[in-house]
Amino acid sequence: MRKIGQLSAEKSAERLHRYLAHKGIENRVDANGSQWDIWVFDESQIPQAREIYHDFSTNPEASRFDAPAVVVKAPVAPPTPQPERVQRNRNVGPFSVTLVVSVLCFWFAIVTSFGNKTEEVAQLKMASSAAAGLSEIAQGQVWRLVTPMFLHFSAIHLLFNVYIFWMLGSAIERGKGNFELLWIVLVINLVANFTQYFLAGPNFGGLSGVVYGLFGYVWMRSRLLPSDGFYMPRSLVNQMILWAILCIIISDAIPIANGAHFGGLFAGMALGALPRLWRPE
């Protein structure tokens, strides 16, 4: 099943639903806030359905779209609260980036005793101290560009980040493949880490910058490139944004890498939206 488009009027969505059904194209209409998503079940019918959707969007009142009434189920919100990509990418192999990153987060949490082993942590931060600057990276300690995302300083910090990362990362990996998820994670991680470093120095760690980046990526793809098949529930968008705002509010009391959150978010949104500039509908 794949989403072929979105309409703003319920009446138009039902009219298109009837016409597609009349043409033998099994489809479903789902409420998505004030919009109505059109889903087609049979992958082989996607090209025909998209062509009909494009023509319908141009002139939804055209008489050619008149069709006999069909039994229509009341539109309902999608049943799952997590982002999903319907069509599985055939190039996904046994190597899972989502699994490897998650396992490494747990491993580094154990090795550093959730940040309590200061010597080990100093070797994994972007810089061992603020005074060192980026000289250590310039001298060849390039792992410091990546390893901050594996550092977590409490069990709750670790479990929350890995849970959201698994939900978002696995959706991208199923749809886009291992390599694309890998480079997306690396790019987002670099932007998040440098943003936080230049704002507040090297004393930070965690996967949350990458998590916000993957969230931004899926969010933009679901809005700007619906043909990709990604879906981001509005409830999850609201929760992620509210949590980012709450983190700013409480950051005076609790050390929180807000720079990494927003650096990662904007990097992910950019990666998700850029293909829209040259990719046709």
Image (cartoon, grey):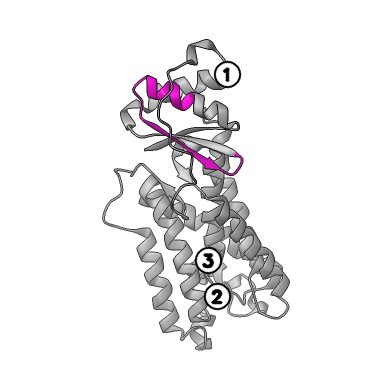
Mark 2–mark 3 Cα distance, whole angstroms, equals: 8 Å
Residue 115, given in percent of the width and then of the height, sits at 52, 84
Residue 30 lies in the magenta stretch: yes
Q: Residues within 10 Å of mark 1 (few under 14, many from 20)?
A: few
Considering every residue shown, the one lying at the far left of the view is 94
Residue type, label 2: Lys
Residue at image coords 45%, 68%: 162
The CA distance from mark 1 to mark 3 is: 49 Å
Question: How many angstroms separate mark 1 from mark 2 (CA)?
Answer: 54 Å
Secondary structure at badge 1 equals helix
Q: Amino acid at mark 1?
A: Thr
In the rendered structure, which segment of residues is drawn in magenta?
16-34
Residue tagged 3: 145
Q: Nearer the viewer, mark 1 or mark 3?
A: 1
84 is higher (above) or lower (below) than 134: above
Q: Using the image as rendered, state which of residue 253 and residue 186 is in the foreground.
A: 253
Residue at left 51%, top 87%? 119
Q: Examine the image and state in which quarter residue 259 appears.
A: bottom right
User: In which quarter of the view is residue 253 placed?
Assistant: bottom right
In front: label 1 or label 2: 1
256 is within the stretch colored magenta:
no
In the picture of the structure, the residue carrying the numbered disc 1 is 58
Quick one: label 2 or label 3, which is nearer the N terminus?
Answer: 2
Q: Secondary structure at mark 2?
A: loop
**Looking at the figure, which quarter contains the N terminus?**
top left
Q: How many discs mark residues in the rendered view?
A: 3
Instruction: Give the class, few, some or many, for how many residues have Cα within 10 Å of label 3's Cα (few <14, many ≥20).
Output: many
Given the image, on which type of amino acid does mark 3 rest?
A: Leu
- Give the labeled residue for mark 2: 125
Quarter of image, res 237: bottom right
The x and y percentages for residue 130 are 66, 78
For disc 2, the neighbor class at 10 Å (few under 14, some 14 to 19, many from 20) is many
